[in-house]
Structures are given as C-alpha cells and as structure tokens.
Image (cartoon, rainbow, N blue to C red):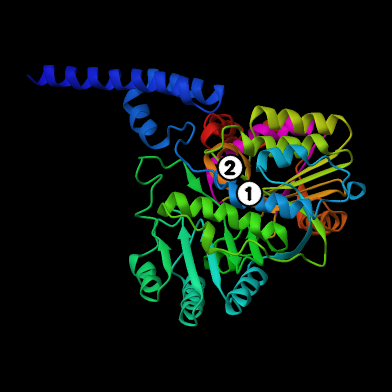
C-alpha cells in the first residue's frame, strides 16, 4: 500500500514537471530562462516543481496598460506635447526608440532637481506633501512601520484631515512585513489604500517574481518624485550594518509629472480595479528649466522586452561617455553585448556597483560578468562609502536618467519599473558630476575572477545560473 502511494506521488510529480516543462518552453521570457527551467524540472523535479510554482515566470497577462488604453488622456498628453515639441537643435540623441517603448512623446518644459541621499529626498517629499492642495498619489516598493514610515503616515493623515485626497499603494512582496494597523490608521483617516494583501497580483497567483518596484509620489499633478529610495530608516543611513546609504531620487516638474501620474493610474487600476483618469488634473504647467524629458515605464505586462531595450537604446546612442550606477549587475546577453561593443568603439564605459553586500546571490553573480566587460575596455568601480543603491545613468552630455531600474534581469523582465529620462546637457552634466563624486568614493576593480578569493571564484559561476531570476 505504501509503495503504491509513493509511486502515485512520484508519478504525479513527474507529470506536473512535464506540464511545467511545456509551459516554460512556451512562455518563458528568454531562451536562457526556458532552457534553465526545462533542465531544472527534468533533473530535479522534487525541488523544481515547488520552485516553479513560486518563481516560474512568463509574460504577465491581464495587466492594463493605461498608456495604450486610456486614449483620452494619452491623446491629451500628446496634443499638449505638440505645443511643446523639443527643439531638434537641442536633441543630439534620437529619442524615437525611447518614445516607442514609453508609448509617449518627449516634450520640453520640464524641470528636475537631484535629491542625493535619504535626508534630502524625504525632506523634499514631506515638504511637498505639506503644501498639497488637491491630491497625493504615493507608491513605494517597501514601506516599513519604523520612524520614517510613521513620519510618512503622520504627514499623509495630516494632509487628509485638511481635505487632500490621498491614495496610497505598496507592493505585496516588498512591504510584506508592513503591519495591518499601519494601513488601518491610514484608512481611518480617510486615505484610500490599495492594501497589498488584498490586491491582485503576486500574492494571489503564487507568483513572487512579479513585483512593482516603482517609487512614485505625485502632488496635485504638478510635482513628481521618482528614484531609488524606499520608506525605511536604512534609507536615511541609520542601519548599523549598512551605514551610509548612497541613493538618488529626483524631484520633477512639467509635463513629465503627468506621464508619471499616468503610470500610477495604471498601477492603481491593477491593484483596485478603479479608474482615476477623470479624478486627476492633466493640464499642469511647464517648468522654467525647460528640459526635454520622457518617463519610460517598463514591466512584464509589456509585449516587448522594454526594460532591456531601454538600456540597449541608451548604450547604442553613446559616443563618448556611458556611466551607469546600479546596485546589481546581472545583464542579459543583449545588454552585455551592447556594453562590450560600446567599450570597443572607444566609449568611456563605467559601471558603478556597491562593494558591500545586501543580497548575496546577485552580488556574487556580478563577478561572473566583470571580466567579460573589462576585457572589452569597460571599467568597473566598486563603491566603498556604505551601500550604493542608486539607479542612474548618463550618456555623453546629452541624456541623463534616474529611476528604479537596476541593471539586471529582474528589473528588465520581472519587475514593474520606471525611469525619468532627461535629454538635456545641464541634466547630463549634473548627473555626471554626481557620479564622478561617487567614483572618488570607490576603487576600480583590477583583479580577474581567477584572482578573487575562493568563495567568489567558485560561487560566481554558480550564482550566474540563477541570472534569469536575479
């Protein structure tokens, strides 16, 4: 009897593995991911079947792309942009690839202020919340109920009490530990909360892969914030382990704020099945800085590989300088090839990564890519003044970007991300100055993988096997 039961379980397991093999082959977002899952499921079904339930990834179906479907708003933004088309003489980079990916046009009339590190970021966000008149849209990947989280809660409740409509959203995976009473206090104050435990998505579908990694704040349709900071005291540099937390956010004004607002409505519709289009202000004003800008949102709901293609387009456009800061460096084949090709063309390619570890697997995997990049002329800098978490890049003196997208497969294909792109010499030079200061707090990697300690030498190739989900 026991033998028959065991046989039945084994048969069911292998049958399930076979079904998952077919599914992985049909729906995996990359050939490498398909091959990896097929080999894993066939060779170790007892481990692979449960892993596929939680980590198996394919295109995210059913996600409403507001940029495409909210025709009234999109057409309004495009019409508004017709009156604010960039001066071609000020555009040394062809914006068309980025516009295709964003389903939105580049426009002039935008402003940007770099917010370097947590104190500057949250001072600016809290100041903006305090003067909000009509509504606040706020979304973070991680929200903690620590001192910073409680301060944010207090600010939002105060805004709601003076009649501001507040909508709050957090990711179900990133904010898994956020206690219910934190959200209940917001709701009791009249704040509209997209409860991460109730919304559709990863927690409902056994999928831990799909994460909304965006960090968005919009005030009255006039002021917007995006960048690498989440809500937790570690982002203020108050964690004893990490110490100084090096991160960058961006305060924006102008047309790009409406584009950021549109992406929020997309995420809100998915979380709450509620359309905010008619409740928000889409007119807005232009910024005196008059920069050309575009908000590029990417994610597994898109039909094409928008995250990787955004980086590919930026790399391909570089003629003199390509500096990228990312806490993780696990590129796909196409992006890696583009980086190598840029370096071989003579472009000053620099990759800034942290020397400190926060997630060991991607930290280790990065070492398996460094030699390939360096052999072609790229330079790797390892940040040593605490932990570096910013996501930013600069191309020549023509394009600067700050946002939420890491240089890894997870950001390319599994996470919902957003980057603010400024096609402007002033913005490019300001980001370059910021990164130059970071290089001075780093050391350039010169040792090959073979020269690294044993745990890196042997661990990196193994960690690289998990690249499709890192």
Tag 1 or tag 2, which sits nearer the N-term? 2
Horizontal and vertical percent for residue 377? 83, 33
Residue at image mark 1: 74
| Above/below status of 15 relative to 249 | above
**Does the magenta segment cover residue 5?**
no
Q: Is residue 89 visible?
A: yes
Find the residue positioned furthest to the left: 1
Q: CA distance from mark 2 to mark 1?
A: 7 Å
Residue in view at x 66 percent, y 54 percent: 390
Horizontal and vertical percent for residue 188? 35, 74
Horizontal and vertical percent for residue 452? 66, 37
Residue in view at x 77 percent, y 51 percent: 82
Highlighted magenta segment, given as a residue range: 358-383
Residue at image mark 2: 68
Crowd class of label 2 (few under 14; some 14 to 19; many from 20; radius 10 Å): few
Dot 2 and dot 1 residues touching (CB under 8 Å): yes
- Foreground residue, 461 or 144? 144
| Above/below status of 453 relative to 295 | above
> Which quadrant of the figure contains the C terminus?
top right
| Above/below status of 231 relative to 212 | below
Crowd class of label 1 (few under 14; some 14 to 19; many from 20; radius 10 Å): many
- Is 81 left, or right, of 164 in this rendering? right
């Amino acid at each position: 009897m026991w033998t028959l039961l065991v046989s039945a379980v084994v048969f069911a397991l292998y049958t399930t593995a076979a079904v998952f093999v077919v599914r992985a082959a049909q729906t995996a977002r990359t050939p490498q991911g398909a091959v990896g899952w097929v080999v894993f499921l066939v060779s170790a079904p007892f481990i692979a079947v449960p892993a596929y339930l939680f980590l198996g990834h394919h295109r995210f179906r059913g996600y409403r792309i507001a940029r495409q479907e909210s025709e009234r708003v999109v057409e309004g933004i495009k019409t508004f942009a017709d009156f604010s088309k960039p001066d071609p003489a000020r555009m040394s980079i062809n914006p068309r690839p980025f516009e295709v990916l964003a389903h939105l046009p580049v426009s002039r009339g935008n402003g940007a202020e770099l917010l370097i590190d947590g104190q500057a970021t949250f001072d600016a966000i809290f100041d903006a919340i305090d003067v909000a008149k009509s509504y606040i849209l706020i979304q973070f990947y991680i929200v903690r109920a620590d001192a910073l989280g409680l301060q944010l809660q207090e600010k939002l409740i105060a805004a709601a009490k003076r009649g501001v409509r507040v909508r709050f959203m957090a990711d179900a995976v990133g904010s898994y530990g956020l206690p219910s009473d934190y959200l209940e206090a917001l709701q009791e104050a009249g704040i509209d909360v997209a409860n991460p435990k109730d919304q559709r998505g990863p927690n409902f579908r056994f999928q831990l892969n799909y994460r909304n990694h965006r960090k968005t704040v919009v005030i009255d349709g006039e002021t917007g914030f995006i960048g690498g900071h989440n809500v937790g005291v570690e982002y203020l540099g108050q964690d004893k382990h990490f110490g100084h937390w090096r991160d960058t956010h961006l305060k924006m004004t102008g047309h790009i704020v409406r584009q950021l607002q549109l992406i929020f409505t997309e995420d809100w519709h998915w979380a709450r099945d509620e359309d905010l289009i008619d409740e928000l202000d889409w007119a807005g004003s232009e910024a005196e800085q008059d920069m050309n800008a575009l908000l590029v949102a990417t994610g597994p709901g898109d039909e094409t590989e928008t995250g990787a293609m955004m980086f590919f387009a930026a790399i391909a456009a570089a003629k003199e300088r390509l500096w990228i800061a990312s806490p993780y460096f696990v590129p796909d084949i196409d992006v890696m090839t583009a980086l190598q090709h840029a370096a071989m063309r003579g472009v000053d390619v620099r990759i800034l990564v942290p020397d400190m570890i926060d997630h060991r697997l991607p930290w280790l995997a990065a070492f398996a890519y460094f030699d390939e990049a360096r052999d072609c002329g790229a330079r790797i800098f390892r940040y040593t003044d605490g932990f570096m978490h910013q996501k930013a890049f600069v191309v020549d003196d023509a394009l600067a970007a700050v946002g939420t997208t890491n240089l890894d497969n997870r950001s390319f294909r599994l996470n919902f991300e957003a980057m603010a792109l400024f096609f402007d010499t002033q913005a490019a030079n300001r980001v370059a100055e910021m990164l130059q200061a970071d290089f001075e707090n780093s050391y350039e990697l010169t040792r090959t993988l073979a020269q690294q300690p044993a745990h890196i030498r042997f661990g990196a190739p193994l960690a690289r096997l998990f690249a499709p989900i890192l």
